[in-house]
Image (cartoon, rainbow, N blue to C red):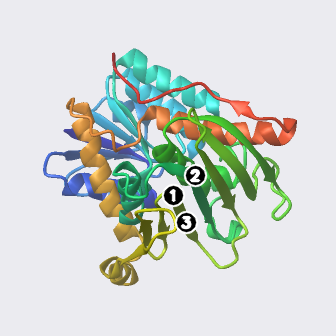
């Protein structure tokens, strides 16, 4: 597979590295508005390009888009229209209508579209999903999700947190992963209610807190909190509760807790998982080492999907669309104090 990458920032460079390390792929080109940035990521004989039309004129099978969110639609649509499969970083775009247009472009082009929700590949969250799917905690009753960091000091550029380029605040930042993990565990989210506030950083259109309820078609509910005033620093926690136990996944550090009981009120079994190897590696090489491994796994699944062997594990275009729709629904619920209903999407199909 011949792959080109648009965007040579921190994530784009990691994506380029994941392509170079996959034996079934070749990194053909890296495009960035900065020629210097493109050259820094275009190692191993790849071309450095600064213009989209020059980039799309190259022989490419797959395009990975890793640019500021407000640029995604133009770049994804152009790549899809030119016959390339596309993997786009999260959020898929900066508003729901734009996401739907990207999904439609993929459908019209009959090309695969994926969204970069790499936290699905973090071992702690993979374990939570496995426990739910295998029935280790019994019938799923509810899910709890929390994610946050200290706020604007964590950002390196205005576009990362200022609407309209960002598309919003905490829900479009750390919270976008939580929204995807909620949908991954619950199945399709069809009802949303919640409240957004801008009382900490006071950036118009960029919520610093969002608290919500997400519900699937069977009434199973997730409670959700994404925040930009978690003064203790970055952290993500996902918990699933069933009628025979609970399982928690958290990062950072990477941890799991599983508590199960065969009968209500009966003896409990407690299993704790730590990931010492990951902690040591991140101390030596930073969080990017964990992200890189997840990108490698995500790319492998996307290539399988393109080849007609869809594992169902990677996030597709509908996943990207629905998470942005969920953020928009919380904003609308804040305004109207109502429950917002969303149509069922399911997994994308080329049929």
Q: On the image, numbered disc 3 is attached to which residue?
A: 236
Left of 28 or right of it: where is 256?
right
Q: Nearer the viewer, residue 147 or 52?
A: 147
What is the C-alpha distance between the residues marked 1 and 2?
Answer: 6 Å
Mark-to-mark CA distance, 3 and 2: 17 Å
Residue 277: where, in percent of width, then height?
30, 80
Are discs 1 and 2 less than 8 Å apart at CB? yes
Disc nearer the start of the sequence (1/2): 2
Q: Closer to the observer: label 1 or label 3?
A: 1
Give 7 or 334, whichever is nearer the viewer. Answer: 334
Across and down, in percent, residue 197 comes to 82, 54
Q: Is residue 30 left or right of residue 220?
A: left
In the rendered image of this protein, does residue 229 appear above or below residue 93? below
Mark 3: secondary structure: strand
Q: Earlier in the sequence, mark 3 or mark 2?
A: 2
Give the residue drawn at x 52%, y 35%: 188
Q: Quadrant of residue 255?
A: bottom left
Element type at marker 1? strand
Residue at numbered disc 1 = 240
- Quarter containing the C terminus: top left
The percent coordinates of residue 126 (x first, y second) are: 37, 58
């Amino acid at each position: 597979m011949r792959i080109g990458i648009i965007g040579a920032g921190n994530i784009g460079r990691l994506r380029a590295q994941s392509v170079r390390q996959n034996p079934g792929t070749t990194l053909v080109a890296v495009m960035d508005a900065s020629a210097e940035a493109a050259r820094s990521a275009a190692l191993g004989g790849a071309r450095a390009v600064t213009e989209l039309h020059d980039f799309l004129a190259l022989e490419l099978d797959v395009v990975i888009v890793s640019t500021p969110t407000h640029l995604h639609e133009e770049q994804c649509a152009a790549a899809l229209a030119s016959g390339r499969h596309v993997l786009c970083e999260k959020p898929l775009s900066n508003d729901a209508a734009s996401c739907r247009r990207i999904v439609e472009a993929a459908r019209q082009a009959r090309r695969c579209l994926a969204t970069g929700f790499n936290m699905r590949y973090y071992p702690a969250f993979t374990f939570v999903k496995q426990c739910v799917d295998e029935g280790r905690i019994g019938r799923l009753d509810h899910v709890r999700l929390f994610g946050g960091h200290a706020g604007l000091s964590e950002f390196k550029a205005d576009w990362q947190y200022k609407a309209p380029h960002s598309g919003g605040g905490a829900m479009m930042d750390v919270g976008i992963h939580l929204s995807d993990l909620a949908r991954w565990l619950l199945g399709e989210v069809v009802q949303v209610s919640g409240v957004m506030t801008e009382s900490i950083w006071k950036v118009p259109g960029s919520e610093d807190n969002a608290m919500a309820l997400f519900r699937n078609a069977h009434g199973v509910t997730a409670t959700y909190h994404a925040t930009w005033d978690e003064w203790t620093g970055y952290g993500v926690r996902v918990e699933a509760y069933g009628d025979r136990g609970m399982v928690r996944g958290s990062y950072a550090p990477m941890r799991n807790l599983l508590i199960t009981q065969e009968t209500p009120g009966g003896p409990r079994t407690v299993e704790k998982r730590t990931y010492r190897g990951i902690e040591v590696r991140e101390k030596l090489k930073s969080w990017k080492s964990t992200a890189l491994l997840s990108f490698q796994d995500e790319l492998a699944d996307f290539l399988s999907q393109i080849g007609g062997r869809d594992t169902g594990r990677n996030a597709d275009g509908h996943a990207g669309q629905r998470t942005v729709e969920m953020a928009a629904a919380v904003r609308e619920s804040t305004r109207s104090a109502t429950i917002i209903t969303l149509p069922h999407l399911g997994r994308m199909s080329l049929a």
